[in-house]
Image (cartoon, helix red, strand yellow):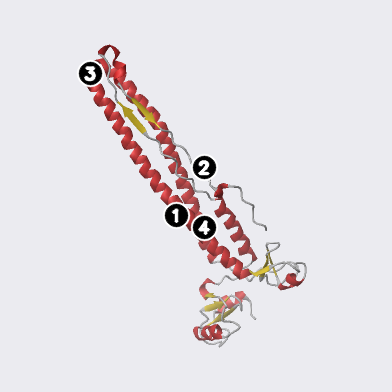
């Protein structure tokens, strides 16, 4: 069998040696034309072989077992490492094994599903935070307006008190608004981190299925598990209760407002410390 480098250079069907080899069999490491590929997929022993476009073939060959210099085609589930067929009957005898391609396919699917779920959750959280932020601003403005209207009735005698009350409302509400803004920024960072991991998934999807890819996918699995999406807090609220008083006690004319502080929900199970993948 010719080397992968030679195959990439020629890209001619290695079965009929005449048509263009537009398909590449990952198991046989050979180029196939359309007709030869169809025949290959109809054979009992090769009908489950996986193909990819020859233009996407990576020149480097499969990673070799450092002990036996053979292709790593299996994964030792006991040791969580890629091994060759000699390792199966040798140093890893008696262990549980899976096909390398099966594990890689499973990891790709799991990573994509988990990441999409977290990105979706972060996106929904961001929308709710933005809506909560807008609603809180409207309530704050409503309280400011109520204080101003009540202060206008008291005229010049209470102008100073009006300013003090408004300033206090804005100062305290600004703290809660800043918390929401900070949470929105953190959620945006989580979303960007998820998008970066999504790009990494696409990069690895075009990488040869071998031990190195297994390690990269395991690391990616770890990083995706570490990615946390902050839960939606209980949004702050503000109320104002008007009250009456005499001219001699004008300060008592102003009602009281209440701002409920933003409270973060309990930490989710996904934020617990996770073990690093074995190398």
Real-space Cα distance between discs 2 and 3?
Answer: 48 Å
Q: Which mark is residue 120?
A: 1
Q: Earlier in the sequence, mark 4 or mark 3?
A: 4
Q: Secondary structure at mark 3?
A: helix
Q: Secondary structure at mark 4?
A: helix
Residue 62 figure quarter: bottom right
Q: Is 56 on the left or on the right of 72, as rendered?
A: left
Label 3 neighbour load within 10 Å: few <14, some 14-19, many 20+: few
- Which residue lies at the image location 30% right of the left edge and 29% below the top edge? 144
> Real-space Cα distance between discs 4 and 2?
21 Å
Q: Is residue 142 above or below residue 84?
A: above
Nearer-N-terminus badge (1/4): 4
Residue denoted by label 2: 266
In the image, what residue occupies the spot 52% across and 56% down? Answer: 197
Tell me the crowding category of disc 1: few under 14, some 14 to 19, or many 20 or more residues within 10 angstroms, Cα based. Answer: some
How far, Cα to Cα, is label 4 from label 3? 61 Å
Which quadrant holds the N terminus? bottom right
Image quadrant where residue 169 sits = top left
Image quadrant in which you'd find residue 58: bottom right
Q: Secondary structure at mark 2?
A: loop
Whole-number angstrom distance, CA of label 1 to CA of label 4:
10 Å
Q: Which residue is mark 4?
A: 114
- Which dot marks residue 46? none
Query: Is the residue 17 above or below the residue 102 in the image?
Result: below
- Residue 195 shows up from this direction: no
Marking on residue 155:
3
């Amino acid at each position: 069998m010719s080397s992968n480098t030679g195959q990439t250079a020629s890209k001619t069907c290695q079965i009929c040696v005449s048509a263009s080899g537009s398909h590449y069999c990952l198991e046989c490491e050979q180029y196939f034309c359309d007709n030869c590929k169809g025949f290959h997929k109809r054979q009992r022993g090769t009908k489950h072989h996986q193909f990819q476009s020859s233009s996407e073939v990576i020149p480097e060959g499969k990673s070799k077992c450092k002990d036996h210099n053979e292709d790593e085609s299996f994964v030792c589930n006991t040791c969580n490492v890629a091994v060759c067929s000699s390792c199966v009957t040798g140093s890893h005898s008696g262990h549980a094994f899976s096909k390398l391609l099966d594990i890689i396919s499973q990891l790709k699917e799991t990573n994509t599903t988990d990441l999409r779920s977290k990105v979706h959750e972060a996106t929904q959280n961001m929308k709710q935070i933005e809506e909560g932020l807008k609603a809180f601003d409207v309530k704050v403005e409503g309280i400011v307006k109520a204080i101003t209207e009540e202060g206008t009735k008291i005229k010049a005698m209470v102008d100073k008190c009006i300013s003090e009350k408004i300033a206090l409302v804005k100062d305290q509400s600004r703290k809660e608004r800043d918390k929401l803004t900070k949470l929105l920024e953190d959620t945006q960072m989580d979303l960007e981190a998820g998008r970066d991991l999504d790009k990494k998934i696409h990069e690895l999807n075009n990488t040869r299925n071998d031990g190195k890819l297994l390690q990269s996918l395991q690391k990616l699995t770890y990083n995706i598990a570490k990615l946390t999406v902050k839960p939606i807090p209980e949004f702050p609220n503000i109320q104002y209760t008007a009250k009456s008083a005499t001219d001699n006690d004008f300060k008592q004319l102003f009602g009281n407002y209440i701002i409920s502080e933003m409270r973060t929900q309990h930490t989710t199970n996904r934020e617990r410390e996770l073990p690093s993948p074995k190398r």
